[in-house]
Image: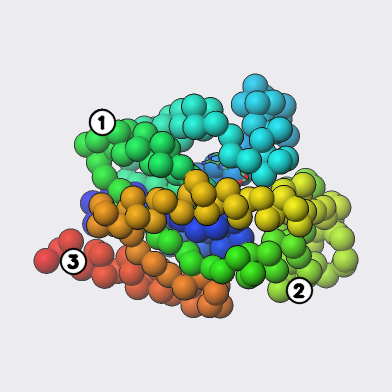
Amino acid sequence: MSELNLILLGPPGSGKGTQGERLQEDFRLPYYATGDILRAAVRDETELGRIAKEYMDRGDLVPDGVIIGVIGERVEGEEAADGFILDGFPRTVGQAEALGEEMDKLDRSITAALLIDVSDDEVVRRLGGRRTCAKNGHIFHVDFDPPKNEGICDVCGARLIVRDDDKPDVIRHRLDTYHEKTSPLVDFYEERGVLKRVDGELDPDEVGNRIRALLATLRLEEEL
Ligand code: AMP
């Protein structure tokens, strides 16, 4: 396959980050997660972070005008010449249209939008138990992936916290936002013939295997 331009779609907590990390290792492609980029900007107190923080704390999306340029810059870069993996972008039809224009401008196209399908109940269960390292951002889960010592990061020994946007009210609001603003992208990419669905409630290794199988099929189809 000449290039692999991938989008990971799915509600918060669907495992996009986990699968994105695996894809990044498998395909040696740059991985751009807008949530991580924005959290780093908040930590570093940049202008972007200052603007984004209030939206993020409420579980709202930052305005399209703020985030579109952030991703545009990256997909245009040399690093992304053979492809990229986007996690958490696009999240609105406006963002998807802007990405489409950017791809047209570069004479490229989206290879696949992978929808990792997970029910709302499962999202609440997953995000409610999530604990994040205050220092390096590594994620644990009280039930599924507990740290060796409660409340302490296995990797660096820093304190584990509940992200403001993983608090119950905010989780519900993020889900409402997902259904209202992001789920229309399922139709958007289906109409363009690039939507691929994966059952995100399976074991993460199995989800990863299915994604690999889907991409292998795409590759074969391209060679035919
Ligand atoms: P995430 O880690 O992907 O769940 O993102 C955390 C938060 O960052 C979201 O709840 C939004 O406030 C913000 N964010 C991340 N990606 C986007 C995006 N593409 N558009 C708008 N806001 C975003």
x and y percentages locating residue 185 in the rendered image: 40, 51
Under circle 2, the secondary element is loop
> Is residue 50 left or right of 192 when viewed as pictured?
right
Q: Which mark is residue 113?
A: none
**Quarter of the figure with residue 34:** top right
- Give me the C-alpha separation between circle 3 and circle 1: 25 Å
x and y percentages locating residue 1 in the rendered image: 24, 57
Q: Which mark is residue 221?
A: 3
x and y percentages locating residue 116 in the rendered image: 47, 64
x and y percentages locating residue 23 in the rendered image: 45, 60
The structure residue drawn at horizontal position 72% and vertical position 50%, both measured from the top left corner, is 170
Under circle 1, the secondary element is helix
User: Mark 1 = which residue?
Assistant: 105
The structure residue drawn at horizontal position 18% and vertical position 61%, both measured from the top left corner, is 222
- In the image shown, does 138 or 34 lie closer to the viewer? 34
- Give me the C-alpha separation between circle 2 and circle 1: 46 Å
> Marks 1 and 3: in contact by CB < 8 Å?
no
Say whether disc 3 or disc 1 marks the residue closer to the N-terminus.
1
Badge 1: residue crowd in 10 Å (few <14, some 14–19, many ≥20): few
Say whether disc 2 or disc 3 marks the residue closer to the N-terminus.
2
Up/down of 64 relative to 156, above or below: above
> Marks 3 and 2: in contact by CB < 8 Å?
no
